[in-house]
Amino acid sequence: MKSIKINFSFFSSLFLQKLPITTFEENCLQKLNPQKALEYRYSRGKLRNFLSPILEIPSLEIPISAPPGRPPKLKEGFGYVSISHSKNALLIGWSEHPLGVDIEHSDRKIKADEIIKRFYTENEQIELKNFSGEDLRKKCLDLWVIKESSIKSIYGTIFQDLDNWEFSKINNTSFNKKIGLKRKIFLKEIDKYKIGIAYDLKVDESNFFISRN
């Protein structure tokens, strides 16, 4: 089955739940400041715990590379994974095909006019001209989540790839003009968080499975 499994959780359990992580990941904690170390421990433990029943592998045996500051990658043949943080929320996605996820608090303050002018395509700018004020901020943030999830689906970077992606509202896809790649887009708001998922054209949205804990 060509499916996508998503987990949405809060850091409210950050200080209560210490899920198992590998010795390498434990050693990485020593290089991080206290807050980053707590976030790293929680996210990697949660990632392994999430993947274990999907892959039917004990959490500590999952072949995943997940150093701090780098996107986690599964060994070839085990599918694709993506994670994103925002404030006290964590979003994790897995699929048999490439995907990227992004999460942002829906009230995040942004300089919409500057972002649109600098990073968004001509067609996107034309589309956003119909909005102003708070409506413009919301639409700009929606597009940012879409673009960042698209970037993550190819292990790209914001500064190199942000203006290469263009979103089409007509067919709900994002297109990378530089490499000629297209992704389907899923956008949803959960508990005042916007979540974006960019995924392979082979996957149907009816095969999404979203869990919360």
Image: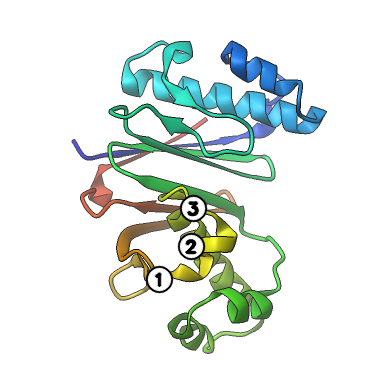
| Disc 2 and disc 1 in contact, CB within 8 angstroms | yes
Q: Is residue 30 visible?
A: yes
Which secondary structure lies at badge 1?
strand
**Residue visible at 57% across and 48% down in the picture:** 191
| Disc 1 and disc 3 in contact, CB within 8 angstroms | no
Which secondary structure lies at badge 2?
helix
How crowded pointer 3 is (Cα within 10 Å; few <14, some 14-19, many 20+) is rated as: some
**Residue visible at 33% across and 24% down in the picture:** 54
Which residue, given by chain and number where applicable, does mark 2 sit on? 147
Mark seen at residue 167? 1
Instruction: Inspect the image, locate mark 3, and give the three-letter code of the amino acid beneath it.
Output: Gly
On screen, residue 134 versus residue 183, left or right, reads right
Which residue, given by chain and number where applicable, does mark 3 sit on? 156
The N terminus lies in quadrant: top left
Q: Position of residue 203 (x, y in %)?
A: 24, 48
Q: Position of residue 65 (x, y in %)?
A: 49, 27
Q: Position of residue 198 (x, y in %)?
A: 39, 54
